[in-house]
Image (cartoon, rainbow, N blue to C red):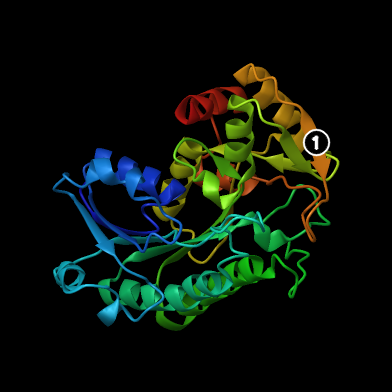
């Protein structure tokens, strides 16, 4: 594999930092752009001494000519000569309304990075003739009436509900990618990412698995919102990165692909597994289900299997053990 230059927005985030690790291991040049609104500097600190890694601290929702917040960052950006691939992973994604890192707490930042940020990055992709991947989400399906969800399903979303700022900004981001592909011939890839977990998740954004693991490790009560019978499908981060890179390097232009694990389980089953695997003495309490929270979520990955040759390899027990070890 020849060496290329990859620009990763949200590269200090959970999935983004794993993408940076993988690409550097393959011998590529990696440019990480992050403003650390939800990303964590500790996720990429081990990469700062790598000569193939460049960190630019910036907000991609601003025009790229002034994308950087300091003169030093502007110098770094000015030195970028040729970019081959852009992965736009930056966005608040935590669904917990009580978390200061969630899209509920950061609604303006969420819609700007997925709309205006996508526009500016597509301009950059056009300039460099780079392939552009947009990290969309299973949330574009809303509370689905079709199960499992194939890419042909247009979704069931409340456009003004409390989750809408994330769901609809991702739907708009997809539309922007398709428009740039049709109008300007930019090669775009659209990844509909389903629930992903693993080490380096930020517990402050309130996502289920790190919250449950930390509570279980400390023998605190675990809170399930709803009756626990709602389902999710969880994909380990290494599998997610494999899927994203296979999609990026494919020829599926402006053609959405689900990337997720199709093994479905209830939230109550997930919590019980975490309590057992941590040897916790925690008990479970139940609370009100948040408005518009999906009842079921499971990807149809037939398209990824057929066109990318991709399917997840790491089962839930193996992935949870690795994640639990990280949070201990």
Quarter-of-image position of residue 110: bottom right
Quickly name the residue at label 1: 285
Q: Residue at x 53, y 58 (%)?
A: 101
Q: Residue at x 39, y 50 (%)?
A: 40
Quarter-of-image position of residue 88: bottom left
Q: Where's residue 198, x and y in %? A: 50, 36
Instruction: Find numbered disc 1 in the image and state the secondary structure of the residue it sits on.
Output: strand
Q: Residue at x 65, y 20 (%)?
A: 280
Residue 266 visible: no
In this orientation, which residue lies closer to the viewer: 256 or 225?
225
In the visual, does 156 lie left or right of 319?
right
Residue 280 visible: yes
Q: Where's residue 38, x and y in %? A: 46, 57
| Structural crowding at the residue carrying mark 1, measured as other residues with C-alpha within 10 Å and reported as few (<14), some (14–19) or many (≥20) | few
**Is residue 137 positioned above or below 62 on the image?**
above
Q: Where's residue 74, x and y in %? A: 19, 73
Q: Residue furthest top?
A: 279
Q: Residue at x 86, y 41 (%)?
A: 227
């Amino acid at each position: 594999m020849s060496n290329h230059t990859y620009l990763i927005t949200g590269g200090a985030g959970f999935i983004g930092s794993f993408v940076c690790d993988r690409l550097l291991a393959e011998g590529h040049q990696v440019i990480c752009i992050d403003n650390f609104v939800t990303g964590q500097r500790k996720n990429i600190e081990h990469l700062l001494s790598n000569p193939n890694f460049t960190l630019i601290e910036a907000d991609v929702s601003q025009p790229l000519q002034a994308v950087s917040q300091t003169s030093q960052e502007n110098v770094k950006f000015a030195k970028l000569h040729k970019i081959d691939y852009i992965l736009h992973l930056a966005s608040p994604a935590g669904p917990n309304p009580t978390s200061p890192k969630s899209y509920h707490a950061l609604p303006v930042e969420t819609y700007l990075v997925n709309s205006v940020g996508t526009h500016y990055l597509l301009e950059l992709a056009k300039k460099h003739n780079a392939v552009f991947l947009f990290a969309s989400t299973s949330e574009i399906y809303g509370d689905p009436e079709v199960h499992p969800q194939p890419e042909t399903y247009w979704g069931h979303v409340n456009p003004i509900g409390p989750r809408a700022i994330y769901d609809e900004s991702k739907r708009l981001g997809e539309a922007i990618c398709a428009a740039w592909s049709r109008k300007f011939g930019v090669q775009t890839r659209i990844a509909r990412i389903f629930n992903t977990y693993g080490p380096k998740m930020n517990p402050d954004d309130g996502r289920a698995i790190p919250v449950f693991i930390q509570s279980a490790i400390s023998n605190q009560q675990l809170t399930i919102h709803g009756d626990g019978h709602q389902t999710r499908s969880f994909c380990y981060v290494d599998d997610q990165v494999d899927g994203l890179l296979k999609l990026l390097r494919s020829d599926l232009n402006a053609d959405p692909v689900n990337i997720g694990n199709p093994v479905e389980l209830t939230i109550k089953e997930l919590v019980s597994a975490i309590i057992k695997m941590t040897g916790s003495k925690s008990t479970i309490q139940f609370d009100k289900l948040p408005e518009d929270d999906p009842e079921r979520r499971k990807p149809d990955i037939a398209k990824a299997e057929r066109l990318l040759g991709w399917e997840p390899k790491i089962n839930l027990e193996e992935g949870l053990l690795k994640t639990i070890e990280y949070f201990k």
